[in-house]
Amino acid sequence: MLSHPYTVFRVRLAHRALLQFAASLQSSLEILLFIAGPGLLGLLAAIALPSLYAATLAWPAAIGLILAQALATAAPVWLLRKRLLPADVARWLLPLPLAPALRWRADAAVAAILVGPLALAYLVSIGVWLQQWPAWLRPVLSAGLAATAASLLLTWAGATLILAARGRAPAPTRRRRQPAATSGYSAGAARPRLPLLWHRLFWLPFWRGENPVGMRQSLLCLAAAGAAALWLWHPAPIPAAVLGIATSAGLTLLTDRGDKAVREQIAMLRPVLAAWPLETRRLERLACALSLLPAMALLLLFGAALATSPAGHSHKVAALYLGAAALAQCAIVALPGLPARARVALVTISILLLTAIGSELWN
């Protein structure tokens, strides 16, 4: 029953989590919508293409394509699972006398909230393809619509399973024996080195518990690397300008989000570090500088690939793009006191400038 208090509680919890998630991404969404608005609309129009095209393939390939699409569209639910059902709420719900069927219905209701916008996007995409009416779609329209519906149902089922697994009791783990507590700053003890402190206070917290920063930055880094690799290859079906925008946006957002996470961690640690007998400013500068490392490493790899690539490109434009990209990353980290709107403007201008320079790379 969808009117059961437990189901209502889970649905309201999901609504609040999604609103908080949208608020946390507001600045990034503003940048993406401003820069890649037409591209995002094109992506929305093509979202149903895999399942429609699957109807033209033999059944093993068609099933594989539908499953891959369902897996890709269910992946955001896995990334949001900690927001949709926080760990403390999950522990509180475990001992409640709730029937398993009721728990499943609540998980399915929350999954439906997430799949609803996807269903709307499928309808828009199918409408675009019906208006275009390509020759390959005409004989397989019914099968393509059935494949799209099957992909949507599989996404819903996968999202429900993810949420159900989130609410299960965790497997028991053996507690390791903790060493005797000792003061790291006793009279005869050496002070820990800055890299060790950075690893303990900045790197590890981004991967522990409910903190999504480590996974988010890893996905941004992979997305930027993939866009840069495709831009270097620039296959014919994908316009080089789109790949240039994706690469520039990926690199800039990677540094922007990483620097923001580090600044928030610094603000949280300052009251504690103020009582420590060490120079915290050096540690903070080190943490901020290391937030540049992923984007700078990608720029170095991209520059090395351009230097050894036989494809015809302008070496002057390549050097200008790499230099401008490095300066943009440094500006984002070196200007921490900017207001929120000014920071959005800085990131947007950086992406637009890099896109304008990169558009001449292959000319």
Image: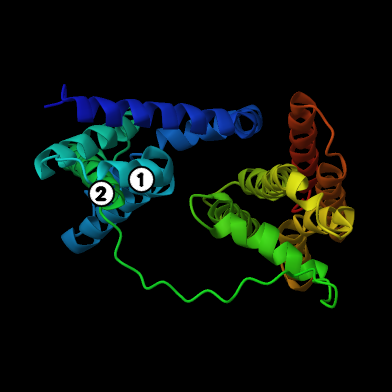
**In the rendering, which numbered label is found on residue 306?**
none
**Number of marks in picture:** 2
Q: Label 2 amino acid?
A: Gly
**Residue 308: horizontal and vertical position, in percent?**
76, 73
Indicate whether 42 appears above or below 247.
above
Point 74% across, 49% down: residue: 272
Per the image, the residue denoted by label 2 is 158
Q: Label 1 amino acid?
A: Thr
- Quick check: 342 left or right of 37? right
Q: Circle 2 sits in a helix, a strand or a loop, which is it?
A: helix
Could you classify mark 1 by the number of other residues whose Cα lies within 10 Å: few (under 14), some (14-19), or many (20 or more)?
Answer: many
Point 75% across, 24% down: residue: 341
Q: Nearer the viewer, mark 2 or mark 1?
A: 2
**Residue 216: horizontal and vertical position, in percent?**
56, 51
Residue 37 lies in what quarter of the image?
A: top right
- Quick check: 86 left or right of 348? left
Residue 198 lies in what quarter of the image?
A: bottom right
Per the image, the residue denoted by label 1 is 73
Seen from the viewer's position, the closer of residues 167 and 178 is 178
Which of disc 1 and disc 2 is earlier in sequence? 1
Whether residue 39 is visible, yes or no, is yes
Point 25% across, 53% down: residue: 168
Q: Circle 1 sits in a helix, a strand or a loop, which is it?
A: helix
Seen from the viewer's position, the closer of residues 128 and 344 is 344
Could you classify mark 2 by the number of other residues whose Cα lies within 10 Å: few (under 14), some (14-19), or many (20 or more)?
Answer: many
Indicate whether 343 appears above or below 294.
above
Q: CA distance from mark 2 to mark 1?
A: 9 Å
Quadrant in which the N terminus is drawn = top left
**Residue 127: horizontal and vertical position, in percent?**
32, 26
Whether residue 128 is visible, yes or no, is no
**Residue 118: horizontal and vertical position, in percent?**
34, 34
